Amino acid sequence: MENLNAYLIISAILFSIGTVGVLTRKNAIVIFMCIELMLNAVNLTFVALSRHLGNLDGQVFVFFVMTVAAAEAAVGLALMISFYNNRESIDVDDMNLMKW
Amino acid sequence: METLFFAIISLVAIVSAILVVCCKNPINSALSLILTFFCLATFYVMLDAPFMAAVQVMVYAGAIMVLIVFTIMLLNIRVNASKAQMHKLLLGSAIGFFTLLNTVVIILKSRAALPNGPYSSSVIKQVGHTELIGREMFTNFLLPFEVTSILLLVAIVGAVILAKKKI
């Protein structure tokens, strides 16, 4: 499949869906999953362009993005667990300790 | 045939991505997200990147999603029926739609550079994708690769410190 634009547009659609999820949902875990969705959309762009240009640098970057996502998952979920232990809730509206 | 397959996979990917956002129950969102990851792995295979597809399935659909589903079940969150505010929903959807419109216009107007790298489809099939990625990673990208190990170490320590009540 040599059609680069189709892959880029699919990737843009997935990224926008992820953006809408981050902006509209309140559950922190769902927001986290939407961020993963956005990261994956970017990965698809990387692989498609790397394939199109005949250059493997983009795919090595995808590897690094996956590493960062794994680290983010470990730390982010630990943060959510400790927040839940304090507040008995996972709603982002309850995260208001620093609010004026 | 390949175009039809591409269309089906993209349809499944988009529908499951929309389900991630729309499902009330976080478990359903997580399962839809796994389906999206598998669709992306299929895209990678179609783009001659089988190693990336394998890593996608193992790391994302395997490790990360197991962690997320485990956390959802551990916290046992009730599905609260509180309605999302209308203005928040409208504003979020408008921003998402604007992002999509902007990106699509840019993609359709611009032209990507012509292929200039040495790795064409035949080279990848001849040498093997994993070997090529390995060569690239352990020559040109050796320093970032080593820095990644420090990042993972910090993440492990951070996760343990945050989640434990008493150290």
Image: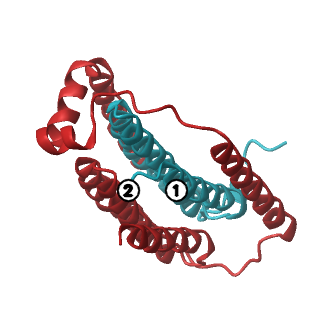
Chain colours: A cyan, B red
Residue at coordinates 65% horizontally, 48% vertically from top-left?
B108
Instruction: State whether residue A50 is above or below residue A83.
Output: above
State the separation of the CA atoms marked 2 and 1: 10 Å
Q: Are both tags, 2 and 1, on one chain?
A: yes
Residue A20 showing in the rendered view: yes
Task: In the rendered view, tell whether residue A7 sits above or below residue B15.
Answer: above
Q: Residue furthest bottom?
A: B81
Q: Mark 2 vs mark 1: which is more N-terminal?
A: 2
Circle on res. A1? 2
Residue B41's x, y, as percent? Answer: 34, 59
Q: Please tell me in which quadrant of the rendered image residue B72 appears.
A: bottom left
Give the residue displayed 74% in from the left and 77% down from the top: B82
| Residue A7 place in picture, x, y as percent | 49, 54
Residue A22 location (% of width, % of height): 65, 56
| Frontmost residue, B59 versus B47 | B47
Q: Are marks 2 and 1 in contact (CB under 8 Å)?
A: yes
- Along the line of sight, the residue nearer the viewer: A78 or B8: B8
The amino acid at mark 2 is Met
Task: Mark 2: give few (<14), some (14-19) or many (20+) Cα within 10 Å.
Answer: few
Task: Determine the residue positioned at 56% across, 63% down.
Answer: A30
Q: Nearer the viewer, residue A20 or B10?
A: B10
Locate residue B131: give its quadrant.
Answer: top left
The label on residue B46 is none
Task: Assign the C terminus of chain B to one quadrant of the image.
Answer: top left
x, y percentage for residue B152?
A: 32, 35
Quadrant, the N terminus of chain B: bottom left
Q: Circle 1 sits on which residue?
A: A6
Q: For numbered disc 1, what is the local secondary structure? A: helix
Which residue type carries mark 1? Ala
Label 1 environment density (alpha carbons within 10 Å; few <14, some 14–19, many ≥20): some
